[in-house]
Image: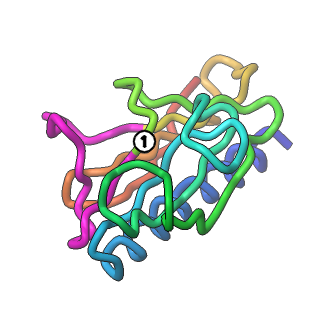
Amino acid sequence: IRSNRIATSTNELIGALTLARSEAMRSPGGAVVCASSDGANCTGSWNQGWIVWMDLNGNRNLDGNDRVIRASQARNRITVTEKNAVNRIEFDHRGRVSLSPTPSEPLALTVAPTTCPTNAKLRRTITLTVAGQITSTQVDC
């Protein structure tokens, strides 16, 4: 059951990142994936959930005519963290990650069960390069 929860959460997060990247390339303002506690605003932590929204006016704030296109709630007994405490991932109109300052290394989100037995391959690391490439790897607890 734990393994299925991790796989589902990982796939949902990868799906959100992929959707944001593809929508960013269709919109001159780009798109954003951010941590969200309520499914409507960029507040809270990745552990509570995330939203994907199109930045239609290009001001990097969720307001006005901007549109939330997907909201996901976090699953019970799953933790999602970003190693550099990044709470939002922005994609520009070319599908590239647009963060200020530009990170020197790829962003890495970790999805893991709250209780993770030693040596069990239940943690997933989702890596996102500046070019927008997404990979996922299994790692030990």
Within the image, what quadrant is residue 55 found in?
bottom left
Residue 48, compared with residue 16, is above or below; it is above
Q: Amino acid under label 1?
A: Arg
Residue 106 lies, with reference to residue 83, above or below; the image says below
10 Å neighbourhood of mark 1: few (<14), some, or many (≥20)?
A: some
Left-right relation of 36 to 5 = left
Q: Position of residue 117 (x, y in %)?
A: 71, 20
Tag count: 1
121 or 14, nearer to the observer:
14
Asked which quadrant contains residue 95, the reply is bottom left
- Residue 89 lies, in percent from the top left, at 38, 47
Q: Residue at x 72, y 41 (%)?
A: 38
Residue visible at 59% across and 63% down? 68
The colouring scheme, among rainbow, by chain, secondary structure or one colour, is rainbow
Provide the major secondary structure of the magenta segment: loop
Camera-side residue: 66 or 110?
66
The residue range painted magenta reads: 89-108
Indicate the position of residue 74 as horizontal and vertical percent values. 73, 41
Give the answer, above or below, for where 48 lies relative to 131. above
Please tell me whether mark 1 sits on a helix, a strand or a loop. strand
**Residue, far bottom:** 26
In this image, 131 relative to 132: left or right?
left
Residue 136's x, y, as percent?
45, 51
- The question of residue 107 being in magenta is answered with yes
Q: Kindly identify which residue carries mark 1.
A: 88
Above-or-below relation of 3 to 69: above
